[in-house]
Amino acid sequence: MMKTIFINDLLKDELVGKEVSVKGWVYRKREFKDKIFIVLRDSTNIIQAIVRKEDVPREVWEKALEFQIEGSLEVKGILKKDPRAPTGYEIAVKDIVVYDYGQPFPIKGDEDIDTIQKLRHLWIRNRRFTATMKIKHSLLKHLRNWFIDGGWWEIHPPILVGNAAEETTTLFEVNYFGKKAYLSQSAQLYLEALIYSLEKVFSLTPSFRAEKSRTRRHLHEYWHFEIEAAWYHLEDLIKVTEESLKYAIEKTIEERKIELNMLGRDISYLKKVIEEPWISMKYKEAIDILQSKGVNIEYGQDLGADEERELTKDFEVPIFITYYPREMKAFYMYEIGDGTVKNFDLLAPEGYGEIIGGSEREWRYNILKKKIEEWGLNKLKVIIGDMEVGAYDWYLDLRKYGSIPHSGWGLGLERLLMWVAKLGHIRDTLPFPRLREGWLYP
Ligand code: 4AD
Ligand code: MG
């Protein structure tokens, strides 16, 4: 029978003294003389069930004895209030329906990371990870809602693509019926094609990066939330970023207090992020600050994880770093005469670093064409039938038929979650992270 009652539905005074039943898994089990305490868990919460030898038929007692941690069952009994129970209520068991007694659960809680990787399909049942998934769900839901309510259209770009959106060095190659294809690094170029009809668009897709670097914040596959808007300039983009993220974080705090507490996240800290204006500084200023802190970095060098940590660790709100030197960034960013581009990286505070990369796009045909040549991308070709065309011809075409200013960004959902939930490693933002180690297991 379908499950209709969840543990959270039972934690109510008006049900005290009534007969209840609930399905779930054994979270903890302890025997004490003629009592067996089973803490049951489901997707919503935990509740203690107590089996008293003198109150139940012998076969119910024997069933209770046989359960292993993570065994599955339905318990039936009378709901009581008990301040000593972990969630304040307790079920005095009358009957048990067995689904699976289970076998000794291979995870005890003190395993090293390699063991966990091998058992990840079981490890993900733990309560901290479940809380993390719920926080991720809320962040995405509210982010998406903010854009939908603001008149943005959700679109569905392809994952198998013929050309790079970002650096060609991080492409994953796929054999596409004997021809070379790639896994998408970003939906941006496709979003750009759609602003001419839908004006404000967003998408959520997996993005793939064959990054050489192994860090706490790099995945080979991550969930990419990207937006693109016609007529937007950099300033408009920055405004939308701050508003939408503040909204998503505020709603998530309201909805996921219990989960954030479970992870030990200080909510009052996150409240400052919502209440205070975010900081903006030019790349040049960021370099000056880093140099004044004794960091060994020159103008023109990229900010790596270490530099970003140094820059953000003393701040309590995110920082927009704007106007990077053109050579450091992708070919599609709008250039201003001084050798910089109209872009930003949004760095999360507390040392977390980049969570969004965005820019105003180069919409002037001649300049974009030159940049594509300068970046060597004009040499890349794709075959259509027996015709060979430049891989970026279609992208250039967008600048020929009613070109307009436009801007957009991409947010790494796992990066956002990592910061909001204050996690130490990005692998814990996904049930089955694609890392170099144990990469397809499970
Ligand atoms: O800065 P990136 O490379 O920018 C783009 O892909 C743009 N085309 C996006 C756009 O304008 N539509 O990536 C955007 C974000 C980063 O800020 C980061 O949050 C995340 O994607 N990201 C990663 N997350 C996890 N693991 C990786 N290897 C990531 N690479 C990028
Ligand atoms: Mg970036």
Image (spheres, grey):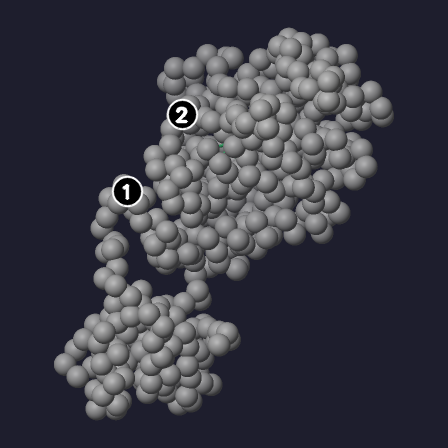
Q: Residues within 10 Å of mark 1 (few under 14, many from 20)?
A: few
Q: Is residue 222 visible?
A: yes
**Above or below for 285 versus 249:** above
Give the Cα separation between the discs numbered 1 and 2: 19 Å
Q: Is residue 423 visible?
A: no
Looking at the image, which residue is at 38% across and 45% down? 442
Looking at the image, which residue is at 52% across and 44% down? 273
Tell me: 37 left or right of 165: left
- Element at label 2: loop
Q: Amino acid at mark 2?
A: Ser
Looking at the image, which residue is at 63% across and 33% down? 187
Q: Which residue is mark 1?
A: 113
Tell me: 281 left or right of 35: right
**Above or below for 439 versus 264:** above
x, y percent for residue 429:
43, 45
- Element at label 1: helix
Q: Which residue is mark 2?
A: 213
x, y percent for residue 261:
40, 57
Tell me: 206 left or right of 259: right
Q: Amino acid at mark 1?
A: Ile
